[in-house]
Image (spheres, rainbow, N blue to C red):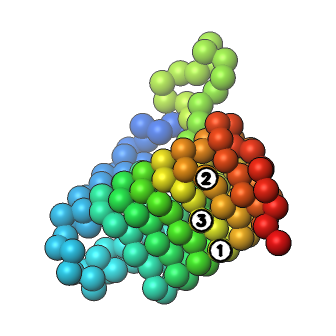
Amino acid sequence: MSEKQKMINGEVYNAYDEGLILLRNKARHLTKIYNDTDPEAVEERKNILEKLFGKIGINFEIEPPFHCDYGTNIEIGDSFYANFNFLVLDDGLVKIGDNVLFAPNVSIFTATHLINPKLRPKNADYTKAVTIGNNVWVGGGAIINPGVSIGDNSVIGSGSVVTKNIPANVVAVGNPCKVIKHID
C-alpha cells in the first residue's frame, strides 16, 4: 500500500515519502499562483482551484491568501465562501457541504501525531477526516481539529477550537467548543 493510501485511510504513514513531497510541492505551487492572482482574475482563480481540489462545486470563492497541504483531499460543495487566510491541512479527507461560509483565519487540521513520544518518530503521522455539513457558518479564527464533524445548519463562533463533533442545528462556541443554543 502506498504512503498516500495509508494517509487517506488514517493509518500511520511516512509524511516524508518522496511521492507525498511531490504532491505537497504541487499544491504549494498552485496556491502560490492563486495567492498572486489579480483580484479581478475570477476565471483564472476558478481554474486553479479546480486543478487543486479533489472536488469543488459551483459558485465558490476563496479570498487569498489560501494554503493547503495537498488540495486533492478537499471536497467542497456548491455556494462556498472562505474569507482571507483559509488554511487546510488536508493530509486526511476534508468534506465541506453546500452553502458554507468561513470568516477570516479559519483553520482545518486533519493531520495528527502519536501521543506517546517513544512511538512518535519524525516521520510517523496519521490522519482523521473532517466533515462539515450544509449551511454551516464558521466564525473568524476558528480551528477545526482532526476527526471532527459539524452538522448541517450549525454556527461555530469566532475563536472557537472544535475538538469534538458538533450536532446539526446548533450554535457552538468556545475553547473547547461547546453547544450554547439550539437553532429552531
- Mark number displayed over residue 181: none
Q: Where does residue 104 sit, x and y in percent of width and height?
A: 42, 56
Q: CA distance from mark 2 to mark 1?
A: 14 Å
Residue 38 falls in which quadrant of the image? bottom left
Residue that carries the numbered disc 3 in the rendered image? 137
Which of the image's four quarters has the C terminus? bottom right
User: What residue lies at 65% left-to-right and 41% top-to-bottom?
Assistant: 174
Task: Please state if 99 lies on the left or on the right of 163 as rendered.
Answer: left
Amino acid type, residue under disc 1 in the picture: Asn
Q: Mark 2: few, some, or many residues within 10 Å (few <14, many ≥20)?
A: many
Secondary element at tag 1: loop
Residue 161 falls in which quadrant of the image? top right
Out of 176 and 18, give the one closest to the viewer: 176
Q: Earlier in the sequence, mark 3 or mark 2?
A: 3
Residue 21 seen by the camera: yes
Q: CA distance from mark 3 to mark 2?
A: 8 Å
Residue that carries the numbered disc 1 in the rendered image? 135
Vertical side of 22 occupied by 122: above or below: above
Secondary element at tag 3: strand
Out of 112 and 82, give the one closest to the viewer: 82
Task: Please state if 55 lies on the left or on the right of 16 as rendered.
Answer: right
User: What residue lies at 73% left-to-right and 69% top-to-bottom?
Assistant: 152
Q: Mark 1: few, some, or many residues within 10 Å (few <14, many ≥20)?
A: many
User: What residue lies at 44% left-to-right and 79% top-to-bottom?
Assistant: 60
Secondary element at tag 2: loop
In contact (CB < 8 Å): disc 1 and disc 3 = yes
In contact (CB < 8 Å): disc 2 and disc 1 = no
Out of 51 and 171, give the one closest to the viewer: 171
Amino acid type, residue under disc 3 in the picture: Trp
Residue that carries the numbered disc 2 in the rendered image? 157
